[in-house]
């Protein structure tokens, strides 16, 4: 081993308790950072996936203005041929057309206002998790069947079961009165009360008839394999739309602005907390290295008077810090990974959190996972600040006068 | 006890012997405690605002419904006691306010569009004090009496419905026999609310008008009561529960909006965890500082022992030193926290993430809330844990043999 | 009555692979009002013996009696009380508490004893005057010369009028004039208050004041002489 390196290493162990305590501060923060960052980004991903897979998809083709106002007449004309063409062109089955309307659903005993989707029975399962969540009956099969699929809470509220009739009342595309009688063919349960209470799905063909859509719909939903794939797909999709149709494509960000902002808001408060942790570790290091420099003043005085340059002493102090920081980095990343892995296996659920989790489409028990990135990001930042904190004690050495230094003991 | 002044003076002087180390440690403690309090104030502010907003849309710290109503919010599950009788049983008690109202899901239709809303049939005079709509800032006018024929809707909803003040809309709901109950109304006012979703989901009409439209006579669907503090609703709950007969369901607000209820609890937990985490991050430095401080003066400790000071006094001296360090740091942190929170009292604009905050149920202006309880909690937790963390170095210091300590070569 | 009685003390230190006998069958009895000089070359065992008498160090074998109490079997707390009440110490080095001023150092023992503030002040001022440090009351040790520090230590040792004063090279850092003054002070205390002094020293001038001179070599007492003090 290099002599300077060995010297630095030995110096660290002159005060083993101090070195361990300082390293301990790093390990503590690093463990926490690895766990929190893994958990946080895991949750974001889950939040995005779970939210988008309910209805939103990765992007949608809509009429201009529809995203903000959802008015019936802001429609995409000839939506079925469009969806078919896109499916062919991109050789992708996860593209489906939809209409959306608001109406009053009445059973024999109750009436509730609900959101009604007109969906393509064949392709809806590719863009939405709802068809897979049918817990009673079946999903829609035919484009024109007079059937409807409703949420479990809505079914309970309306006091209907499979086979019962529902009357739908609402406004058609042109503002005229729209009405239909349909049969409940399926009941879905997502576990998210808002969705289970407020939505129903009927076949797009029937929907177009009932609401006088004249072949139009409101959204073509596109899901890609991954978020990244979706990003690549977006420009191609825009390009393939007929230029004169005046249609727009919104990605998930634009469709669910709340999602990204909730993540941003959460991130900024999380980063504030991480920042504080890192600063506290930096103070610890500053303290330790300053002490270790001060208590060696006499000895530094001697080597300086022997002709050593202050720069080399400064580098020695930085090297000591780097070694200590490296221990903190490695041990912290490892303990953090182990700690997180325990939860990867056993899951993490915070009592009382279920309600909050549901608000963001998260399951009550989450399984954080470390990747190399999440395991190393926090510790690296701590490491950087560790070195930064040691600069002051190291630079002080330049002001050291050998004679004065030797007088101190 | 007699020794305390001597020990305190010694501890304080020793603290400043190595002033650089003490200043660094003080800064760390100050930053740590500042962060504890600042962060807590922000989250408290957010949760308070969420709850304030949340409670404002379902006003009433304590609410009375038909037992079935919350599961099945239909006029079929209504409260048939007329207001006169309610007044007779409640007016004697000391509530800040109470009101009965009709609250049912409904569909609102303009010439072009329909939307689902929550229909509120209210007595405008009774709810003026606690409504989330400030009556005077309504475009047009607010409802004037329980039998007002107009409807007041949110501005956002009006946009979506393509309607405006003076135009007509139709409200549709069901009557107790599940016949469609509908009626045309003229829009008389548009309100604005702190959260856009409120503007889209609530529609106000007069209580008597609503009762007529829904054909429920003098019945209502809920009676709400306001106490003085939403955090402590039990007194109000007791008062109400005493006066309401067994057939009705009396609930505290957090039993109705469980999201907000758990939010409050989760935040309490969060505050504690945050305080402890910061403390732990600080504790390494604290113990380190004490170990160093003891190490530097082993000889002097030996001298004091040799002069007849008891080991317990040495222990006390180190503990006092640690407590002085912590208390000074905490004090600086507390002052910093107050100084930084004060200018933000007017609210922090976070509208950049407004829709995200709305997803959480929070509005886009954050008002930090500094509670004495939280400040005390942070300080006390740090002092107690700090005391415990200092025990080991202090104990070691008191265990030195005087001769060994004096002759120890530095 | 005897103030100090040591019976067959032995203390062995291990230094590397050899044993050093710091005290080798040492027995000595010192009467109340005694004024004894311990004289030995460096490493002769002076400090070890003083420490044993002061209860700072427990010998390997033998008995130590101070004020008719057997102290080598006392608990730490009892020892602390005994030192506080009966014994004044002047150490060879590291005598003062660096964060306290001269006066506070002198008051320290009294403060621990619980002497009221006013009395403490008065006594400490008087004693500082006696050791010639008037005007330096508010200096910290780092701001004083070695000799001045030594005098503060002496002042602290005698301020509460202990029955026994153990001094390890008290004049090591003093010039001849101040060391004479110091010894006059000790002699006076010895005469008027019957305070017992045990002083370890190489200093011929100090020896002149002693009533009894005990010479040690390699941990053994080799000579024990009464003499007429100067
Ligand atoms: N803690 C110790 N560890 C090992 N050996 C010791 C220790 N203390 C004293 N000794 C040894 O015991 C012997 C007596 O030491 P002591 O300090 O009593 O001598 P002294 O007469 O006071 O000398 P000086 O005049 O130099 O102060 C010496 O040989 C010394 O090296
Ligand atoms: Mg000696």
Image (cartoon, grey):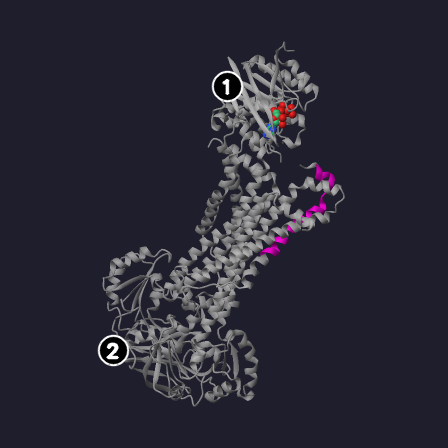
For residue B372, which numbered disc appears in the image? none
Foreground residue, B223 or B72?
B72
Q: Is mark 2 within 8 Å of ligand 1?
A: no
In reply to whether residue A392 is colored magenta, the answer given is: yes
**Residues at discs 2 and 1 both on one chain:** no
Magenta stretch: dominant secondary structure: helix
Would you identify the image quadrant in which residue A170 lies? bottom left
Percent x, y of residue C217: 63, 19
- Extent of the magenta region: A382-406
Furthest-top residue in view? C228
* B290 magenta-colored: no
Circle 2 packing at 10 Å, graded few (<14), some (14-19), many (20+), is some
Q: Nearer the viewer, mark 2 or mark 1?
A: 1
Residue B184 spot, x, y in % from top left: 34, 81
Looking at the picture, does residue C220 appear above or below residue A121?
above
Name the image quarter holding residue B48: bottom left
Q: Which residue is mark 2?
A: B177
In the rendered picture of this protein, how many numbered marks are placed on residues?
A: 2
Q: Which residue is mark 1?
A: C65
> Closer to the camera, B177 or A155?
A155
């Amino acid at each position: 081993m290099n002599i300077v390196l060995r010297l630095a290493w030995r110096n660290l162990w002159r005060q083993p308790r101090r070195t361990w305590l300082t390293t301990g501060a790093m390990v503590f923060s690093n463990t926490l950072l690895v766990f929190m960052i893994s958990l946080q980004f895991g949750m974001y991903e889950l939040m995005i996936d779970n939210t988008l897979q309910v209805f939103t998809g990765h992007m949608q083709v809509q009429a201009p203005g529809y995203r903000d106002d959802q008015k019936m007449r802001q429609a995409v004309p000839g939506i079925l041929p469009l969806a078919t063409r896109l499916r062919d062109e991109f050789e992708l089955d996860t593209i489906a057309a939809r209409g959306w309307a608001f109406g009053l659903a009445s059973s024999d005993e109750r009436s509730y206002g609900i959101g009604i989707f007109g969906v393509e029975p064949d392709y809806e399962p590719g863009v939405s998790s709802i068809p897979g969540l049918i817990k009673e009956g079946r999903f829609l099969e035919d484009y024109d069947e007079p059937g409807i699929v409703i949420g479990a809470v809505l079914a309970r509220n309306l006091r209907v079961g499979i086979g019962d009739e529902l009357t739908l009342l609402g406004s058609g595309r042109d503002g005229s009165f729209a009405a239909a009688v349909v049969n409940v063919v399926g009941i879905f349960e997502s576990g998210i009360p808002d969705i289970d209470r407020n939505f129903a799905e009927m076949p797009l063909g029937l929907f177009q008839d009932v609401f006088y859509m004249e072949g139009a719909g409101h959204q073509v939903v596109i899901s890609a394999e991954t978020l990244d794939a979706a990003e690549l797909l977006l420009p191609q999709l825009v390009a393939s739309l007929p230029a004169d149709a005046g249609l727009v494509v919104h990605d998930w960000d634009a469709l669910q602005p709340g999602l990204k902002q909730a993540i941003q808001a959460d991130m900024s408060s999380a980063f504030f907390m991480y920042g504080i942790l890192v600063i506290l570790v930096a103070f610890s290091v500053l303290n330790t290295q300053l002490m270790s420099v001060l208590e060696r003043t006499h000895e530094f005085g001697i080597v300086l008077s022997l002709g050593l340059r202050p720069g080399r002493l400064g580098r020695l102090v930085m090297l000591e810090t780097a070694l200590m920081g490296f221990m903190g980095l490695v041990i912290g990343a490892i303990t953090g990974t182990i700690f997180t892995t325990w939860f990867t296996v056993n899951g993490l659920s915070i009592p009382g959190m279920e309600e909050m989790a549901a608000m963001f489409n998260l399951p009550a028990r989450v399984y954080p996972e470390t990747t190399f990135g999440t395991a190393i990001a926090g510790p690296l930042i701590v490491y950087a600040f560790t070195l930064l904190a040691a600069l002051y004690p190291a630079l002080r050495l330049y002001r050291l006068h050998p004679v004065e230094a030797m007088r101190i003991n | 006890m007699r020794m305390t002044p001597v020990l305190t003076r010694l501890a304080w002087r020793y603290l400043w012997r190595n002033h650089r180390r003490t200043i660094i440690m003080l800064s760390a403690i100050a930053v740590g405690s500042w962060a504890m309090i600042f962060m807590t104030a922000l989250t408290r502010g957010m949760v308070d605002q969420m709850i304030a907003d949340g409670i404002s849309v379902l006003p009433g710290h304590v609410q009375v419904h038909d037992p079935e109503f919350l599961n099945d919010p239909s006029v079929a599950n209504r409260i048939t006691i007329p207001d006169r009788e309610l007044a007779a049983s409640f007016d004697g008690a000391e509530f800040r306010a109470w009101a009965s109202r009709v609250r049912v899901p409904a569909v609102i239709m303009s010439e072009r569009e329909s939307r689902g809303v929550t229909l509120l049939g209210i007595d405008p005079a009774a709810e003026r004090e606690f409504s989330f709509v400030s009556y005077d800032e309504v475009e047009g006018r607010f409802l004037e009496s329980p039998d007002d024929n107009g409807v007041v809707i949110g501005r956002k909803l009006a946009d979506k419905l393509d309607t405006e003040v003076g135009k007509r809309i139709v409200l549709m709901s069901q009557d107790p026999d599940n016949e469609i109950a509908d009626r045309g109304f003229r829009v008389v006012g548009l309100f604005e609310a702190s959260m856009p979703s409120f503007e889209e989901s609530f529609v106000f009409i007069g209580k008597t008008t609503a009762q007529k439209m829904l054909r429920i006579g003098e019945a209502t669907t809920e009676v709400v009561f306001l106490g003085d503090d939403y955090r402590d609703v039990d007194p109000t709950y007791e008062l109400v529960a005493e006066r309401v007969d067994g057939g009705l369901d009396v609930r505290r607000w957090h039993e109705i909006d469980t999201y907000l209820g758990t939010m409050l609890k989760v935040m309490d937990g969060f505050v504690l965890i945050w305080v402890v985490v910061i403390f732990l991050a600080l504790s390494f430095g604290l113990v380190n500082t004490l170990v160093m401080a003891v190490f530097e003066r082993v000889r002097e400790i030996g001298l004091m022992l040799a002069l007849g000071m008891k080991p317990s006094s040495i222990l006390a001296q180190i503990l006092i030193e640690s407590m002085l360090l912590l208390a000074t740091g905490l004090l600086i942190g507390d002052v910093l926290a107050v100084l930084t929170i004060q200018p933000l009292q007017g609210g922090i604009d976070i509208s950049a993430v407004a829709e995200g905050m709305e997803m959480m149920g929070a509005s886009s202006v954050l008002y930090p809330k500094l509670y004495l309880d939280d400040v005390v909690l942070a300080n006390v937790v740090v002092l107690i844990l700090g005391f415990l963390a200092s025990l080991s170095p202090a104990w070691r210091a008191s265990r030195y043999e005087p001769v060994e300590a004096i002759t120890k070569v530095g | 009555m005897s103030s100090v009685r040591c019976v067959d003390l032995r203390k062995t230190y291990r230094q590397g692979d050899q044993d050093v006998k710091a005290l080798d069958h040492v027995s000595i009895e010192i009467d109340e009002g005694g004024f004894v000089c311990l004289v030995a070359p460096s490493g002769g065992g002076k400090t070890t013996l003083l420490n044993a008498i002061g209860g700072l160090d427990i010998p390997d074998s033998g008995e130590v009696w101070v004020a008719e109490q057997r102290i080598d079997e006392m608990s730490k707390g009892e020892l602390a009380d005994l030192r506080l009440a009966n014994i004044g110490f002047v150490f060879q080095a590291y005598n003062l508490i660096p964060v306290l001023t001269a006066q506070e150092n002198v008051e320290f023992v009294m403060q621990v004893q619980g002497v009221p503030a006013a009395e403490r002040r008065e006594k400490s001022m008087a004693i500082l005057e006696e050791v010639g440090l008037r005007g330096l009351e508010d200096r910290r040790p780092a701001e004083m010369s070695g000799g001045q520090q030594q005098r503060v230590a002496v002042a602290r040792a005698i301020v509460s009028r202990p029955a026994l004063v153990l001094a390890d090279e008290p004049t090591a850092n003093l010039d001849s004039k101040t060391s004479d003054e110091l010894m006059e002070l000790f002699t006076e205390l010895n005469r008027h208050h019957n305070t017992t002094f045990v002083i370890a020293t190489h200093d011929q001038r100090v020896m002149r004041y002693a009533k009894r001179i005990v010479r040690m070599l390699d941990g053994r007492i080799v000579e024990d002489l009464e003499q007429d003090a100067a």
